[in-house]
C-alpha cells in the first residue's frame, strides 16, 4: 500500500482566511508571500497579498513599478499560457502606515468636526508619523479592515524581518494595555494626572515655547487628548478584534526560512514565539534549497565519467563545480532535517534555489508550483 502523500500548500491552508508569513530578512519571504497568494488565486480564491514592509520588494516580485495603499486587482491572464490558469482573483497592496491610521480615525470619529480636529492637530500629526515608522499599528488596523469590511476569502500578509514580526504579534496586547490602562485614563480625566503634570512650572515652559514657535503646545495637547477620547473605544474594539483574529483557528502563521544557519535559528525562535502566544503555525517553508550534488559518487568518479565525452580540463572543472554544490546540498539536507525535528514539522515545503531573482508573475508561478506540490525529494530529505 503506497504511503500517503505529504500535505502541500492547499492542504495546509484549507479553511484558513488569514495567512501571515514571518521569517528572517533575506530569505525570500516577500516572494513566498506573493507565490502563496498566487497559488491560492489559481485554485479559485479571491486573495489579497499585503506587505507592511516599507521596501518595494512585493511590487518587484509582482513585476510592478509600485503598489498602491489600496488593494489593486492584478491581471494574471497570461499565466494560462504557461499552464497555470488563475480561476480566482489576486489583489495586492502596500500599507501606507500614516494614511491607514488617518483612515481609521476618520471612520471612528463621531462627526466631521471631531475628525478634522484630530487630523489637523499638530500633536496627532507628529504621533501618527512616529507610529507610522513602526508599522505595527497600521497593520493591525488594515488587517481588521480587510478581514471584516472586505470580501476577500484569504489575506496573505508579508511582514518585516523576524524581530519586527514579533513586534507585530505582540502589538495588539501592548496597544490594548496602553488604550485601556490607568495612565491614559488619568491623563484624559479632568483634573487628573494631566492637570498635575502640566503644573505651573511646565506651564511656564509651554508659554516660552509658544512665544518662540508661535504654537500653543498646552492648548494643542489639551485639544488633542479631548478629541482622542472620542475614538478610543472604537480603537480598542478593533484592537481586541485583531488580537482575537491572530488566535483564530482560521488564521495561521507560515514560517519562511533558508538553509543558512542564522535564518534557520530565527525560524526556531519564531516558532517558539508563535506557540507561546497561543497562535497557530501552518508549516515551514524552506527557500533556496540545493538538491543537486554528487549523489553516491565521488568527484573523481564523476570526472572519469565526464572525461569520456569532454575535454579532460573541462571535465575536471565540472566535477569540481558539482562537488561544491554537493557541499551545499549536504548542508541543506542537514538543516532541513534539524528544523523538521525542532519544529515538529515532518514535511516542510521546499523551494529549490532557482539561481535568479523573481521579478514577474511567471517567476512567481514557478515558485507557486513548488509550493502547491507535495514537498520535494522526500528521499533526498530522508537521506
Image (tube, helix red, strand yellow):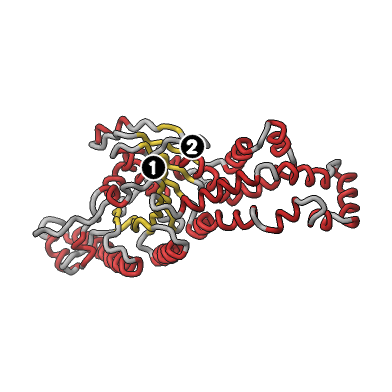
Give the residue at x 54% y 51%. Answer: 240
**Would residue 21 be found to the left or right of residue 166 on screen?**
left
* Residue placed under numbered mark 2 in the picture: 149
Query: Which label belongs to residue 16?
Result: none
Q: Position of residue 306 (x, y in %)?
A: 14, 59
Query: In this figure, which residue is indicated by the disc labeled 1?
Result: 154
* Depth check, front residue: 77 or 284: 284
Q: Can residue 29 be seen?
A: no
Dividing the picture into quadrants, the one containing residue 102 is: top right
Q: Residue at x 47, y 40 (%)?
A: 148
Foreground residue among 148 and 128: 148
Residue 152 point in image, percent of width and height: 41, 38
Q: Could you say which quadrant of the image residue 330 lies in?
A: bottom left
First reached walking from the N terminus: tag 2 or tag 1: 2
Asked whether the residues under the numbered discs 2 and 1 touch, taking CB atoms below 8 Å apart as contact, a structural biologist would say no
Q: Which of the image's four quarters has the C terminus?
A: bottom left
Question: Callout 1: helix, strand or loop?
Answer: strand
> Where 152 falls versus 15 (above or below)?
above
Which image quarter holds the N terminus? bottom left
Q: Position of residue 158 (x, y in %)?
A: 45, 48
Work out whether residue 12 or residue 373 is closer to the camera in this orientation and state it: 12
Circle 1 packing at 10 Å, graded few (<14), some (14-19), many (20+), is: many
Amino acid at each position: 500500500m503506497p504511503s500517503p502523500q505529504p500535505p502541500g500548500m492547499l492542504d495546509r491552508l484549507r479553511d484558513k482566511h488569514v495567512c501571515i508569513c514571518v521569517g528572517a530578512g533575506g530569505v525570500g519571504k516577500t516572494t513566498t508571500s506573493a507565490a502563496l497568494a498566487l497559488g491560492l488565486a489559481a485554485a479559485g480564491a479571491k486573495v489579497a497579498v499585503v506587505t507592511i514592509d516599507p521596501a518595494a520588494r512585493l511590487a518587484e516580485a509582482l513585476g510592478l513599478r509600485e503598489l498602491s495603499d489600496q488593494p489593486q486587482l492584478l491581471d494574471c491572464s497570461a499565466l494560462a499560457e504557461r499552464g497555470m490558469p488563475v480561476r480566482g482573483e489576486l489583489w495586492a497592496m502596500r500599507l501606507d502606515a500614516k494614511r491607514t491610521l488617518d483612515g481609521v480615525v476618520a471612520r471612528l470619529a463621531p462627526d466631521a468636526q471631531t475628525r478634522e480636529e484630530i487630523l489637523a492637530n499638530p500633536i496627532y500629526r507628529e504621533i501618527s508619523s512616529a507610529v507610522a515608522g513602526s508599522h505595527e499599528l497600521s497593520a493591525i488596523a488594515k488587517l481588521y479592515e480587510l478581514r471584516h469590511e472586505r470580501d476577500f476569502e484569504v489575506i496573505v500578509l508579508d511582514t518585516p524581518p523576524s524581530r519586527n514580526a514579533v513586534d507585530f504579534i505582540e502589538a495588539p496586547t501592548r496597544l490594548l494595555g496602553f488604550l485601556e490602562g490607568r495612565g491614559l485614563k488619568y491623563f484624559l480625566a479632568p483634573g487628573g494626572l494631566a492637570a498635575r503634570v502640566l503644573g505651573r512650572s511646565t506651564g511656564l515652559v509651554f508659554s516660552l515655547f509658544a512665544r518662540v514657535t508661535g504654537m500653543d503646545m498646552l492648548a494643542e495637547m489639551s485639544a488633542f487628548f479631548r478629541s482622542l477620547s472620542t475614538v478610543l473605544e472604537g480603537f480598542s474594539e478593533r484592537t481586541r478584534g485583531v488580537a482575537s483574529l491572530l488566535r483564530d483557528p482560521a488564521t495561521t502563521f507560515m514560517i519562511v526560512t533558508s538553509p543558512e544557519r542564522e535564518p534557520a535559528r530565527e525560524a526556531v525562535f519564531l516558532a517558539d514565539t508563535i506557540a507561546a502566544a497561543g497562535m497557530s503555525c501552518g508549516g515551514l517553508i524552506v527557500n533556496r534549497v540545493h538538491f543537486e550534488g554528487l549523489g553516491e559518487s565521488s568527484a573523481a568518479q564523476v570526472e572519469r565519467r565526464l572525461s569520456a565525452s569532454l575535454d579532460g580540463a573541462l571535465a575536471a572543472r565540472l566535477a569540481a563545480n558539482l562537488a561544491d554544490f554537493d557541499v551545499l546540498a549536504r548542508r541543506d539536507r542537514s538543516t532541513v532535517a534539524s528544523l523538521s525535528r525542532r519544529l515538529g514539522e515532518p514535511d516542510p515545503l521546499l523551494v529549490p534555489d532557482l539561481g535568479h531573482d523573481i521579478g514577474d508573475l511567471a517567476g512567481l508561478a514557478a515558485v507557486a508550483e513548488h509550493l502547491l506540490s507535495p514537498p520535494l525529494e522526500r528521499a533526498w530529505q530522508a537521506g
